[in-house]
Amino acid sequence: MISPYRLIQLKRDGGTLPPDMIEQFIGGYVDGHIPDYQMSAFLMAVFFRGMTAEETSALTKTMMDSGERFLPEDFAGMITADKHSTGGVGDKISLILAPLVAATGIGVPMMSGRGLGHTGGTLDKLESIPGFNTRLNRRQLLDQMQKIGVAMIGQTDTMVPADKKMYALRDVTATVDCLPLIAASIMSKKIAAGPQNLILDVKVGRGAFMKSQQDAAKLAKTMVDIGTAHGRNVQAILTNMHTQPLGRAVGNSLEVMESVDVLTGKGSKLLRELTIVLSAPLLIMAGYAPDEHSAITQLNKLIDDGTAYEIFKKLVETQGGDVSSIEPPYSLPLGKPVVLKSSISGVLSGIDPMIIGLASIELGAGRKRQDDSIDPGVGFLLHAEAGDTVQKGDALVTVFTAKPLPESLKTYILSAFEFDQEPSEFTNNLVLDRISPGS
């Protein structure tokens, strides 16, 4: 076995690590033989030197095999699918997509994460529903999948423990923003959860971790290649997180409400459209639709006839949540409303999602550190979207908060709203690119 010192040195100097060396090093870290300081040095070497496709795939496999995992056959013949988003402000698509895809008969064992930084987490949104339990063990997950065909859970202590330990170090060593480490972290968890078919929503723009389309495409291709190498059907879609937050709600309880609005045939048309765009490839990959038109038609019907919403209610009930709280009129926790109005007239050209995301952290809807607590009642309800004409005195946003809203924070929030004085043709391209195996 090569020494950890030699492995770190080899990567520091730009060398290529063979799979067995990566496996021994990660295994030694998980079982406690390799200390944090040597893993930190390794992460920094990867940050600066990168990894080849083969190294990244080997790292993913080793992380994936570091603990408990599910195989496609564990789901008793059920065809399964999942979706992952790299994170964006107001991104609640998982809450709509999971029951919608499950309504077609495809099993959806969705393992999600918590919010960190300016982006929200699916688990935090779900846990704003009183009683909702995101911590299911292996038996509970498999039983629920057979019963209702969908489950939404968090990473257990025994699943991909290498990723848990490594991410905690990346968070404090400035190595989070590293393409091979991001790809290995995401794909090790997604493959370990056992789905046969996977759609990757890679956000691009001011409100995303990937600011440029070029960098987003590199990450998407890396993840698609990893999934394909491990026998999964994978496609990535690059989506716009530059112009405005996704939908009109930002904040945990508010985003659950907006998700239910879409599932009941109301709410944001853009949010519904993007959810269906991301869902359709899963139906095609799973053999449940011959083409995109057929898939889209099927998905729209499942929303319009109420089937998808009924599946969501079954999901909430089965995982211990209070179903009455997600039935209009909603009874989810909400802070005191404060309405902020426009001081000018004009055409709204954009709503900076980063400003909204950072303001949500200040008020308690997000986390600066992984152990920060969340206030589910904090949030923003946008009264206008990019392209709308706004008059002076019109309400732009209602802020829900348990804290007093300082004037400085009001000013900061209002600075997110960008205006053109003259009407202009406005387009908001939701889908920027698609990345498939071999592309």
Image (tube, rainbow, N blue to C red):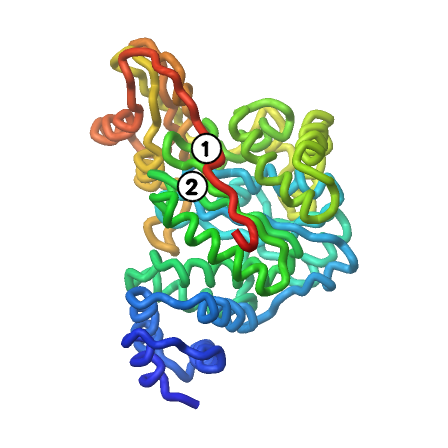
Label at residue 260: none
Whether residue 130 appears in this view of the structure is yes
Q: Considering only order in the chain, which callout, 1 or 2, is on the residue closer to the N terminus?
A: 2
Q: Position of residue 100 (x, y in %)?
A: 66, 38
Mark 2 crowdedness (10 Å alpha carbons): few <14, some 14-19, many ≥20: many
Residue 107 versus residue 373: which sits nearer the camera?
107
Asked if marks 2 and 1 touch (Cβ < 8 Å), the reply is: yes
Q: Is residue 62 found left or right of 282 in the rendered image?
A: left
Q: Which corner quadrant of the image does residue 196 belong to?
A: bottom right
In this view, the residue farthest toward the left is 408
Residue at disc 1, secondary structure: loop
Q: Amino acid at mark 1?
A: Leu
Instruction: Look at 60% across and 37% down and name the residue there.
Output: 96
Mark 1 crowdedness (10 Å alpha carbons): few <14, some 14-19, many ≥20: many
Q: How many marks?
A: 2
Q: Amino acid at mark 2?
A: Gly
Whether residue 313 appears in this view of the structure is no
Residue bearing the label numbered 2: 88
Residue bearing the label numbered 1: 246
Residue 281 versus residue 185: which sits nearer the camera?
281
Instruction: Look at 40% across and 41% down and name the residue there.
Output: 204
Instruction: Look at 65% across and 50% down and name the residue there.
Output: 81
As drawn, 177 above or below 87:
below
Q: Position of residue 425 (x, y in %)?
A: 38, 16
Q: Position of residue 202 (x, y in %)?
A: 46, 46
Residue at disc 2, secondary structure: loop
Q: CA distance from mark 2 to mark 1?
A: 8 Å
Q: Which corner quadrant of the image does residue 22 belong to?
A: bottom left
Q: Is residue 150 found left or right of 47 in the rendered image?
A: right
As drawn, 290 above or below 1:
above
As drawn, 372 above or below 55:
above
